[in-house]
Amino acid sequence: MSIPARPAVVVTRRRTERRVVVALLSIIILAIIAADAFVLLKRFRYQAESDRLRNGMTSIERERTDLLLASTEKRSQVMVELIRRQAGGDENLHLAVAVDSGFMHLQRDGARLRDMPIQVGAERVLGAMSAGDSLHLAIPRGTRTIERIITARDSWVVPELVYRDREEELPPLAERRIRGALGPYALILSGGTVIYSLPETGPLADSTYVLPAAIRANAADLQAVFPNLRAGMRVYFY
C-alpha cells in the first residue's frame, strides 16, 4: 500500500522558507539604507556647520581661508608627485608604496620588478596613553629606510596603541613580547613605520584589522622579495 504524497506540507514549507529569505533580504536592505542615511546626515551636518562658520567670516577672511586650503592641497599634491618621481629615478633597488592605489612595488631605475597589493592601516588619534600624551598615527608619506628585517622566529613588542585601538586590556610588557607577532615576514622602517604580513598569533592575527598607519602585504609577496631586501634600503611612500 503506497503512502500518499503530502503536497500541501511541501508547499507550506517552501512558502515558509521563501518568507524567511525575503525577511532576511529586507533586513539587509534596511540596514544599507540606514547606513546611507547616517552618512548623508553627517555630510549635511558638516556642510551646515561649514556654511555657518563661513557666514560668520568677513569676505577677506573667506578669501584667505580658501587660498590657504587650496595652497595646502596643492603642496600635498606637489610633494606626492615629487616623491613618485624620485622613486622612479632611483637607480638602486628600492620599495615604492603607492598609498592611495593600494600597491607596493619592488623597483629599480623606473623598472617595476614586482607589484604587490597591500592594505593600509587607517590614521588614528588616540587619547592619553600610559605615558600621559595623546598619539596621532598618520599614514606615512615621504622617504624611509629599512632598519630591521624580521621573520616569524623574531619577537616584537606589541605597542600599547594596538590594545587601545582594539579596546582590549593592556597586558604586562613581558606578555606583549610575542614571537611572530608581525607574521612570517616584516620590515621595521625609520620613524617606526611597519610593513608586515598577517601573523598566526598575537592581536594582529585578525584579517579584518590592520595596524594603524602601517602597511600589511601578502606573506607570499614579501617572501618573494625578501632575498632582495636589506637594512638601509630606501622605501618611498606617495
Image: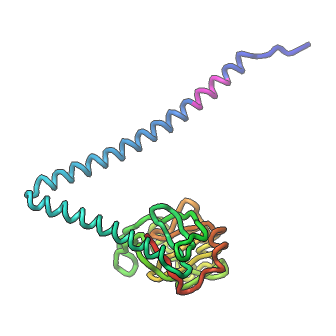
Provide the residue span drawn in magenta: 13-21
Q: Position of residue 42 (x, y in %)?
A: 31, 49
Q: Foreground residue, 72 or 39? A: 72
Q: Residue at x 59, y 31 (%)?
A: 20
Protein image colouring: rainbow
Question: Is residue 201 at least partly visible in the picture?
Answer: yes
41 shown above or below 226: above
Q: Residue at x 53, y 83 (%)?
A: 233
Q: Quadrant of residue 179?
A: bottom right
Locate the N terminus by quadrant: top right
Q: Foreground residue, 70 or 86? A: 86
48 shown above or below 193: above
- Label count reads 0
Q: Residue at x 41, y 66 (%)?
A: 123
Q: Position of residue 184 (x, y in %)?
A: 65, 74
In the image, is 131 to the left or to the right of 6?
left
Q: Position of residue 182 (x, y in %)?
A: 59, 74
Locate the C terminus by quadrant: bottom left
Majority secondary structure in the magenta region:
helix
Q: Position of residue 73 (x, y in %)?
A: 29, 64
Question: Is residue 203 at least partly visible in the picture?
Answer: no
Q: Residue at x 34, y 66 (%)?
A: 77
230 shown above or below 125: below
In the image, is 176 to the left or to the right of 142?
right
Membership of 50 in magenta stretch: no
Residue that lies at the very extreme toward the right in this rendered image: 1
Membership of 15 in magenta stretch: yes
